[in-house]
């Protein structure tokens, strides 16, 4: 197997080599200072991490544009139609999207919470997003995987608050202990506020080697007394033997939960995906042009095609005790339900309406 994640070299500063023209003019136009990642030198002494006087003010970005094709067999049985899993009530009386919005409310108020959905999902999504202001619901013309949707969302947020600190949340995951997750998100936010050139990921302690997950391999602590670590390597869905070795070195599951400065995220994305950055920046305010732009975009995955190439610019905060699962397969849903001693909802006599 070819490793997409690569171990960081002691000299650091890997960045995104050979990624085309610089779009720094567009980035600078949004009004934030250009930030450079510090060079990672393995032998440097650890310095105490400063404290922040108050909790950083966060924006929350909820990603609800996935099609959830792997769970459509289950959602058909529960909802009567093969709908994306984030709009389905797989456990209890709330959909995964509604449960995500409830979790996010402990971290950012609705006025600073933005969700992105697909245009063809709007009939399902509108009622479930009713707690958000209308202007905080972003609509992408179609699903082009996580990369374009996240980039489009960050560009929209940057027009409103270019210096904001943003936490990103998938809308289709399960979390048993949302209050514990909120503590870890706030800790990652403090780390990102203190290290503005870094993007802070939350890493989940693995329960088993699993080829369906990405892995974050921690390096050195970011400072004396810190709970976060530099990222030595990012592995996207390695095979089981490789995953077993990563876990033995302290590797964590990638939960696709991250916190960073919008300016830094966009600066890195402008380097990594310059053509997509330019196209989406130019078309974001014109619905017809955006639809044509999206139709021509090649899909790309934020974890595989961005995070796996950006290890030098990442830190990871281990998130212990959250009870997290991505519910990406029927088996992972059943694993959670068995742990909860809950019968599968699709065994009920009648499907529950989705919205």
Image (cartoon, grey):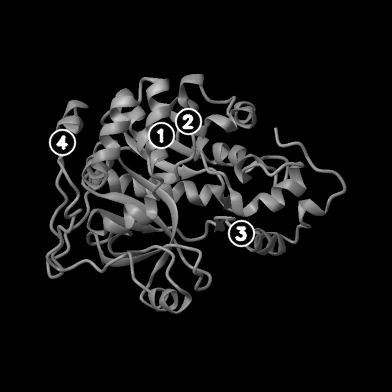
Dot 3 and dot 2 residues touching (CB under 8 Å)? no
Left or right of 208: which side holds 157? left
Looking at this view, is 300 or 97 the one in front? 300
Q: Which residue is mark 1?
A: 294
Q: Nearer the viewer, mark 3 or mark 2?
A: 2
| Residue at 19% in and 30% down | 26
| Residue at 44% in and 77% down | 244
Q: Earlier in the sequence, mark 1 or mark 2?
A: 2
Residue 147 quadrant: top left
Q: Earlier in the sequence, mark 1 or mark 4?
A: 4
Q: Is residue 234 above or below residue 288?
A: below
The answer for how far apart the CA atoms under marks 3 and 2 are is 26 Å
Rate crowding at label 4 as few (under 14), some (14 to 19) or many (20 or more) other CA atoms within 10 Å: some
Q: Earlier in the sequence, mark 3 or mark 2?
A: 2
Q: Which residue is mark 3?
A: 329
Q: Does the rendering let one see residue 58? A: no
Rate crowding at label 2 as few (under 14), some (14 to 19) or many (20 or more) other CA atoms within 10 Å: many
| Secondary structure category for the residue under label 4 | helix
Dot 3 and dot 1 residues touching (CB under 8 Å)? no
* Quadrant where the image shows the N terminus: bottom left
Residue 141 bears which disc, if any? 2
| Secondary structure category for the residue under label 3 | loop
Q: Earlier in the sequence, mark 3 or mark 4?
A: 4
Q: Nearer the viewer, mark 1 or mark 4?
A: 1
User: Looking at the picture, how far across and down is residue 34, in whole percent?
Assistant: 14, 38
* Quadrant where the image shows the C terminus: top right
Q: Which residue is mark 4?
A: 24
Q: Does the rendering let one see residue 255? A: yes
The answer for how far apart the CA atoms under marks 1 and 4 are is 22 Å
Looking at this view, is 247 or 222 the one in front? 247
Q: Earlier in the sequence, mark 3 or mark 1?
A: 1
């Amino acid at each position: 197997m070819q490793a997409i994640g690569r171990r960081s070299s002691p000299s650091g500063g890997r960045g995104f080599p050979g990624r085309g023209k610089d779009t720094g003019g567009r980035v600078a136009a949004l009004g934030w200072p250009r930030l450079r990642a510090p060079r990672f030198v393995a032998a440097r002494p650890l310095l105490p991490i400063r404290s922040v006087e108050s909790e950083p003010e966060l924006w929350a970005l909820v990603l609800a544009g996935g099609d959830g094709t792997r769970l459509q067999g289950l959602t058909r049985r529960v909802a009567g139609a093969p709908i994306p899993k984030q709009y389905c009530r797989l456990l209890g009386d709330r959909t995964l999207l509604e449960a995500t919005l409830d979790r996010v409310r402990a971290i950012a108020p609705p006025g600073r919470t933005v969700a992105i959905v697909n245009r063809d999902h709007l009939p399902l999504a509108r009622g479930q997003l009713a707690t958000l202001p209308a202007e905080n619901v972003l609509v992408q013309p179609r699903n082009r995987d996580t990369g374009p949707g996240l980039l489009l969302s960050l560009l929209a947020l940057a027009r409103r608050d270019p210096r904001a600190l943003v936490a990103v949340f998938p809308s289709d995951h399960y979390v048993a202990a949302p209050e514990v997750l909120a503590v870890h998100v706030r800790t990652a936010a403090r780390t990102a506020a203190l290290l503005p050139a870094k993007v802070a990921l939350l890493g989940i302690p693995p329960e088993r080697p699993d080829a369906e997950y990405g892995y974050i391999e921690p390096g050195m602590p970011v400072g004396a007394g810190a709970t976060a670590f530099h990222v030595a390597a990012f592995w996207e869905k390695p095979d089981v033997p490789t995953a077993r070795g990563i876990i033995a070195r302290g590797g964590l599951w990638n939960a696709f939960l991250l916190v960073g400065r919008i300016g830094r995220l966009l600066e890195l994305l402008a380097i990594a995906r310059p053509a997509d950055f330019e196209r989406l920046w130019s078309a974001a305010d014109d619905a017809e042009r955006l639809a044509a732009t999206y139709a021509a975009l090649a899909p790309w995955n934020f974890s595989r095609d961005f995070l796996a190439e950006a290890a030098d610019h990442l830190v990871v905060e281990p998130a212990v005790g959250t009870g997290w699962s991505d519910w990406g397969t029927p088996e992972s849903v059943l694993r959670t339900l068995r742990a909860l001693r809950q019968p599968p909802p699709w065994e009920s006599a009648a499907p529950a309406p989705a919205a």
